[in-house]
Amino acid sequence: MTEPTVRFDHITKRFLGVQALDDVTLEVAAGSCHALCGENGAGKSTLGKVLAGIHSPDGGKLFVRGREVRFNSPRDAFAAGVGMVHQELAYCGNMSVAENLLLGKLPRRRGFVDRAPLDQRAREMLAEIGAELDVRAPMSDLRIAQQQLVQIATVVGAGADIVVFDEPTSSLSQADADRLYELIERLKARGVTCIYVSHRMPEIYRLCDTISVLRDGRHIATRPAATLSESELVTLMIGRELGDYLPQGEERGTGKELLRVERVSVPGKVRDVSFSLREGEIVGLAGLVGAGRSEVAQAIFGLENVTSGRVFVDGEPARISEPKDAIRLGIGLVPEDRKRQGLVLGESGLHNTTLPILSRLSRALFVRRREEETLASTFFSALRVRTPNLAAPVAGLSGGNQQKVVLARWLAANSRILILDEPTRGVDVGAKAEIHRLIRDLASRGNAVLLISSELPEIIALSHRVLVMRQGELVTEVPRAQATQELLLRLMAGVELVPAA
Amino acid sequence: MLASQETGLVIVVALVVLTLTALAGSHADRLSGTAVNNFLNSNTLIQVATDASFFAIMAIGATIVIISGGIDLSVGSIYALAGVSMALALRALGQASPSTIVVVGLLTCVGVGLLCGVLNGMLVVGLRVHPFIITLGTMWVLRGIAFVATKAESILVPFSLTSVTKASLGLRGGLYPVPMLVMIAVTILGTLYLTRTVMGRHIFAFGGNVEASRFAGLALGRIQLGVYAVSGLTAGLAAFLGASLYGSASSGDAQGYELYVIASAVVGGASLIGGKGSAVGAMLGALLIVLIRQSIRTLHFDQNYEWIVIGCAIIVAVVIDRWSAGVTSRRLSRSSAAPATGGIT
């Protein structure tokens, strides 16, 4: 047996009283693609960050290519050929692609940055991973997928042959994710060892040959991917049998129309979109990133400049010019970007939950705090939000629990029309199943749900019908019986439209 | 009911008071002949509180602005304009009953302050320019208006105002506790406003995350307008106390106060990034800065060192505050490691 490229030897790490890693010992074979799986908080990202020099372990040893190493910073790791592609991309948006690629080692001549070799070197680094981008464009003009390419190029182009990917597809569309998979496969073919942190089943099985499972900071198992079934993997990750991981939704009768959108347009983003939502109905909204899904959601919620079209709530024409109007009409939006748009991270779960409805909870300007706490704790226990107490800042909660706080907000606001934009993005398997159950539950109580998701299995499993958007327009509606991943993908991408059966 | 955030500040203030008491020495009282500490005596303490009251009242306004993620550099100028407006208005009013004079004076001061604050707010919201720039501009414009309106003269205000501000309220020995009492009242009102009212909670959310506040349906423009209005209002109130205490108002009053005020707010735990701060903290911050100034006098240091000492003290205070906040959050996270649900602790 060959020497493992990376060996974690009894690694432990504590954060502020939380045992993030507990005596983890595992080996990564040279040239393999090794998955680190586990629920959020299982320690998989932390382990990746220990390898990349971002966290230094409290105990245990780390070996790279047989030699013990001690990384005090990402720079040290980089020097040893270890790089990391982060879940949340860090870059200087105002600087060019080339500058970002070579930040820290900008070519200089007499103290000034030398442009020509800078651009040249940047192009070479991008070519290394087969990417072509305008190296002079400001970073902020790039799409997320392109920004990620720059990050991969930074790492690989600088000579790293051990790359940690930390949930790299969490904010990519299906098509961009597919391109990323191909890139990772190419890297693998070149002998680059990939450590792939993820909890998305399909991509793990597509890319990885070995799977290690972490739970509560402990190493649970390492198996070849070929011998570990998907359901076994889920069981290992959550430590219990999960009855219905993603069961098919059942057809059910729906009630009266709650929301009707008629020929709504937002200049440059959405054109002539019409659809309706009924009581008890979950309607999926599929489309590639940039197809205008979130824009439709935000237009209904009063956040976009709607130039034409009408919206009806309960059959009555509704004037929604700002979110306040939408909230008053019983519309709730769980936004795409939980941390930026959904929550005030430094504030408590309690305050985040009641933020939109404080005036309803107040008497003579003062917030009735007892009532507020009762309301929030009712929904926190209904949604099983795991938090030390109502006053704990939401910044400290896991992704799934943060998302539940945003959901609790709209339930507390009595919203009957719920627009959920990527409700399970960055949420672990257990919480995901809970959120799915919750969405069904909400619908069965007579609410209408518009579900936007980049995960087609999620849309197919939950929706009664699926709307497909492409380039700002609603192209078609697919009833649940016909909704397959393949058909939806074709419709979303606009290739070879199969004639309707 | 002090939040952990303020405990550190209380300790620092207490330490300064103890040190000053220990080092100040004492003198013999003229009447009774008993030994009186040069610092720890009612006269000096009320003097410190009076000096602090102007800063503290405005610092509470500034804290509210800073929590929203903004900044108000114009409070010193608002103070000056409100003061001279009152002096001019009362001169125009001529002879009147003392109560009329007090009511007109107070309304003019507070009204002009509020108006200037609303102007700041409208400019910030309407022009979408960073409040630093807007209030830097109005800082000069408003003081300029005061300058032009008074032709740079100092204007006396009627004695009935001074008699209210310097009222002894039954205390002996020429003590006047009114400014201090107003400071305490404003601190209580500010605390209630920030922690208990809908508006206060909206300000925290706005400063913590504007985008999330928009998605939660808050009226963003109104929140921003509101914080500058409150800041102007507190400057007007401080101007009323100041002008009536000293018996005159001039366009040169309160030069540089904006920096003392912002320093008080920041020393009091307000974060310039927004989303964090408290009225009690601002009051304690103002008190600490005035105490440090006082210590130079009490300990007979060279007055010329005042700015150096205050500058260093501000930086040290903020670093200590950050450090103690870190310790507290670590302690909190350790105690919350045990699973629990629901209920507020």
Image (cartoon, coloured by chain):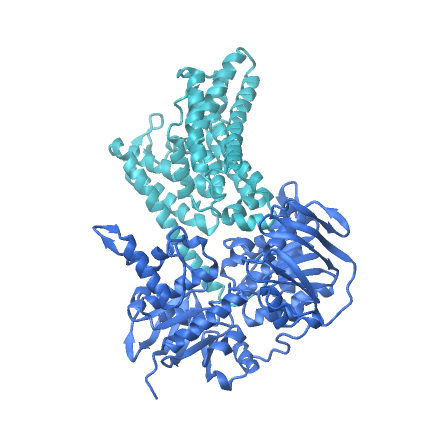
Chain in cyan in the render = B
Q: Which chain is blue?
A: A
Query: Can you say whether A104 is above or below A37 in the image?
Result: above
Q: Residue B53: in sight, yes or no?
A: no
User: Can residue A484 be seen at all in this image of the molecule?
Assistant: yes
Q: Position of residue A359 (x, y in %)?
A: 65, 45
Q: Residue at x 54, y 10 (%)?
A: B95
Q: In which quadrant of the rendered view does residue A70 lie?
A: bottom left
Q: Nearer the viewer, residue A91 or B39?
A: A91
In which quadrant of the rendered image does the C terminus of chain A lie?
A: bottom right
Measured from the top left, where is residue A169 in percent x and y? 49, 67
Query: In the current view of this chain or complex, which residue is farthest to the bottom?
Result: A1
In the foreground, B99 or B75: B75
Q: Specify the quadrant that holds the N terminus of chain A.
A: bottom left
Q: Is residue B173 above or below residue A61?
A: above
From the top left corner, tell me how far across and down residue B178 is, in percent: 48, 29
Front-lying residue, A351 or B283? A351
Q: Residue A358: where, in percent of width, then height?
A: 63, 48
In this rendering, position of residue B106 left or right of residue A94 = right
Name the side, left or right, on which A74 lies relative to B280.
left
Which residue is at the far top? B95
The residue lying toward the viewer, choosing from A181 and A294, is A181
Q: How many marks?
A: 0
